[in-house]
Image: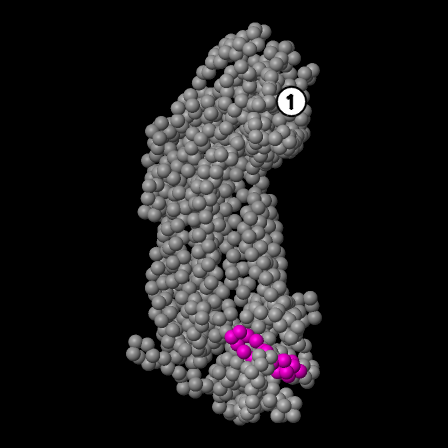
Amino acid sequence: PTHASVGHACRGRAAGTRDSPGASAGSKRASAGSSTDTRAGRGAARPDSRKPRSAYSLRSGSFPEARLRSRSAPRRGMSRRPRTGKVAWDAQSVASYATRRGGYGKSRRASSRVSAYTPSDGGTYYDGDTYYDGESRYDGDGGETYYDGDTYYDGESYWGDEYEEGAYVPPDFDIADEHAREQNPQHSAISKPFAVKPMDLKQYGVGVVLYFTYMRTLSFCFLVLGVLALPSVYLNLTGTFYEPKDDLLQQMIEQTSLGNLFPLYEWEMGGPAFGADGEVVTTAPTIGSSLYGGVSAPPSPEAWVNQTNGFVGEWTHGEALRVTYFGFKQGKDELLVGLSYLNLVLLAVFTGFAFVIGPVQENIVKEVDKNLTTIEDYSVSVRDMPRDVMDPQELWKFFDQRIGKVQDVQLAYNTSELLGLALEREKLKTAYDSAAGRYRKAREDPDTSDRKAEKLKETALEKKRELHSVDAAIRAIQNDRMGDPQESIMAYVTFQDEESFLQCLKEFRPGLFAWIFRPKKLRMREKYRLVVKQAPPPGDIKWQNLQFGFWERQFRQFNISMFTMAVLAVAFISIAGVTTLENETSTEYDQEGCRAECAYSTDPLTLENARLREIYETCFQEDLAANATAANATATAAARRLLQADAGASSATNATTVVYETDPEFGTPEQQDAVAAFDGRGSTCGPFDAFCYACYCLEHIDATSVYRESSYCEPYVYGFTLQIIARGASQGIILVLNVVLNPLLVFLVKYERHHSNSGEQRSLMVKLFLAQFFNSSINLLIIEGAFPGLKAYFKGTLAEGVLFEGDIEDADPNWYADVGSPLLFAIVTSPLSARLGTLVRFITYRVKRWLSMSSAVTQDELNAAFEGLDFDLSTRYGEVLNVLFVTMCFSGGMPLLVPFAAVTFMMNYIIDKFDFARVSKVPPWYSNDLAYASASLVAYSAIGHLLFAVWANSFYRVEEDPLVASIIGDILYSFCDAWEKSAPKPLHNLFGTVTSMRTVARRALQKNTAWYTLILVVLTFVLICRTIAGVARTVLAELAPGTFARGLRKAEGNPPFELAVQGEQLVGPKTYSIKEDPQYEAAFRKIVWEADDGNI
């Protein structure tokens, strides 16, 4: 066998020596005189004439309590298959015995003496100090290794010649319960989850405190905003545009929006308009006449029709319509201005919250840090030191002589690949242990067939081969290095007292000038200028990424951001394509008009009269031929044309009196009247006969029963089938994107190689938020919107007919029905499903624990089942930011969003507290980066709010505000003129959405939008200045840190480090040693390599 320690490979030190925890198989044959020195990183093979039949190793450190077993000793789970062999230890019996012997809650790492006597082979005696088996003797004389040719023991590991056939020992419940207490301490510590306050959670890390504080503040803020939004909701209800609907939620969304106030005037005319080719026409048609219910405005003045000079007349309108509220009547134009003032009050409150949340979080961090003593209060990180520093003592002496007493020094090396393989090996080892445990359990179960046991054995052997492949990769890396010194990347220095820690930060103060003029006595080896900062929490460090430099990480982040954008672009194109197909295959019709003019039965939906069926179909085909259009398009065109026909013809339809047949095949009297009317016209189609064919088939489509009339309604069946396929494809793409996107981003962000968990989570949060916001709102806006400029730009390309085929040109009432409603549905359903997910998580957690009592075959499996689920802060922050941005961006026209968001945030805050206290395990000790990043984005949602408010309100044209126009009017018109002249096409006219950029300025200066515009300009200027100030402060902090640096440490009165540890005041880890980090425990396991002999 060959042996090497991954842990010592990472440290570049020798294994197989007395002071190395990695000493193991390298000294097996010490008693036989064939020992060969084995150094970590070399993986040198030891000559061996005899191969052991099994090997087993446990974690480094003190060996837990164990029980020696022999064949003659009675044991639980005795195999029905006879086995031979001597003594064997296995991990499960070791752990189980430790608990039973030491009492409830005994740690698996505890150590005590165990005695066992096995007389089967001439007498074997072992009492923890002395070992005797008739041939060899070990007296506990300071040596750590015993080997007699058959049996091996080195203080930590034991193997015997038949260990692979060891007995199955079930996992121990007590150990799993104790493990759960360690991983989920809050489950028992928090007695009332719903009453807990954020500051009560400070012992679980500042990241947890900041998240719950953020949610509590956000809930309170939106509760106030929800109250402020209620008057706007009520005033929108005074409009009468939208009709009642069967879907009450849809009705509520529409009637509480600005669209319900349409129309504003009795009639309205003026302004430029588009022609069929997308160019501006010089005549000024009636604006929105179809939305006025088909009522035409008065004729245009002669000045409006001037083809020669291209003159377009001034806008004019009739009297403003009035609404009544609280007994008062008011014109809708004045009401819109009043609504804008109400919205500005709401915006002022939100903006105050957006700019205050950051300082509030900083104060919380200071308070938590002041009241909580952690190892970060004594530790610094050191970079730019010599790469050949291999001995921590060199750094220890350097800081001890120049700063103060040092408590500990931990070095980080360029071991990224080894650490990655070690973590991968741990996953494979867990899978192998489970497979081997299932085989051993089945082998000892009399009810399990030999065939099934052999299959389980083959599965375990396959897992073992996978494990060995990773072992080979680890050994290859170690061999390649040939024991050469590794490079040190950085160090973590912990001081014995707070004074030395603060003195270190003072002496090694940040800043460019301080770095350049660093005195020689503070330069390591009088040459290297160290960069010293306060150390992050130990659990926040990603050791495997420390060797990746700044520019390499930036390059990786750029590439992954581009890949994410490409994924979203592909999803957008796919959704746009199927949505366009769905819209093109759908046909709208007037159900009430259809039933008034057509003779088919509606309950049930039938057309029994065969002659009338033939008449309707024949007339429809003649209409198709006359119009020379495709079937689907003609059905719609014919329906719309015939609806506008002279309704007087219908009276002639029913004028003829006949004797009705009672046979069901002749249909109802109305159907017989329709046939008689056709015959009375000399077998000539009436104005509604073709229309009724379309109505009958479209009613069947609405009732999803068109396939029962598939042969009769053939022109519509094809379109309906395509519509179903398109709708299903659209929903499928969205579903797949929602399911796949989050795990994909989690996977990709890991390759950005962040140095901390907080940095990785911050990047993930931003990407998740942007992806969700794009999918839930921006995607819908672009797909449903009409962009004539972009449509013309892509004409003749593969994108023609797929992209930018929407028909909503402005924030008219149709926008709120087709776009606004899905947005609000998303706000309601997405967080609600997430909160229901908490209930599912709770049930899953409890059921998993219960089932694991009988299904778990290893202690690791049982421990994992007893662990709480992950409390993922990045996903939660991303979801909250998405709801916040959608709400703020679109609440300017849909104020109902605000109360819904308030309920959502309150639910999140309350239910997440229960999730943390009863379902989840304690998350890693995150820094404040995640909370700060989230807070820094909040203010930008106010920009979105103002932009949409200007657009939505300016759809209703009112007079210009003279005050605001006098302040920024000239500047705004000049900017729009310059934009139109200099911006490239189709950006020069906002992708064809406006005829002239001066229209944008005009709309922005109306009385109901002018103050939005002014505040938008001011707020944008403030945010730009804040960004510039942040960058400038960062630069100036490098030049003059004493004046401009933020977050400089001050004395907190922390006790000396040793006293803090002894008095249990120190919260969290007590060292920066990677060996003490549970995430990297696998990197310091002892590995005994062996040939694959087909044994478990």
Pick the residue in front: 578 or 396.
578
Look at 48% across and 64% down and name the residue there: 823
Q: Mark 1 points at which residue?
A: 2
Name the residue: 61% across, 70% down: 708
Say whether residue 738 is left or right of residue 1016. Answer: right
Q: Where residue 247 appears, x then y in whole percent?
A: 45, 68
Number of numbered discs on residues = 1
**Helix, strand or loop for disc 1:** strand
Q: Mark 1 is on which residue type?
A: Thr
Residue 620 found in image quarter: bottom right
Of residues 250 and 753, the one nearer the viewer is: 250
Q: Where is residue 538 in the image (x, y as percent from the top left)?
A: 46, 36
Q: Looking at the picture, how far across and down is residue 664, in whole percent?
A: 57, 79
The magenta span reads 599-618
Residue 239 drawn above or below residue 427: below
Most extreme residue toward the left is 327
Of 913 and 540, the residue lying toward us: 913
Quadrant position of the C terminus in the picture: top right
Q: Is residue 1011 visible?
A: no
Q: Residue at x 34, y 34 (%)?
A: 1054
Q: In which quarter of the image is the N terminus?
A: top right
Image location of residue 332, percent across then percent down: 39, 79
Residue 137 located within the stretch drawn in magenta? no
Is residue 656 in view from this perspective? yes
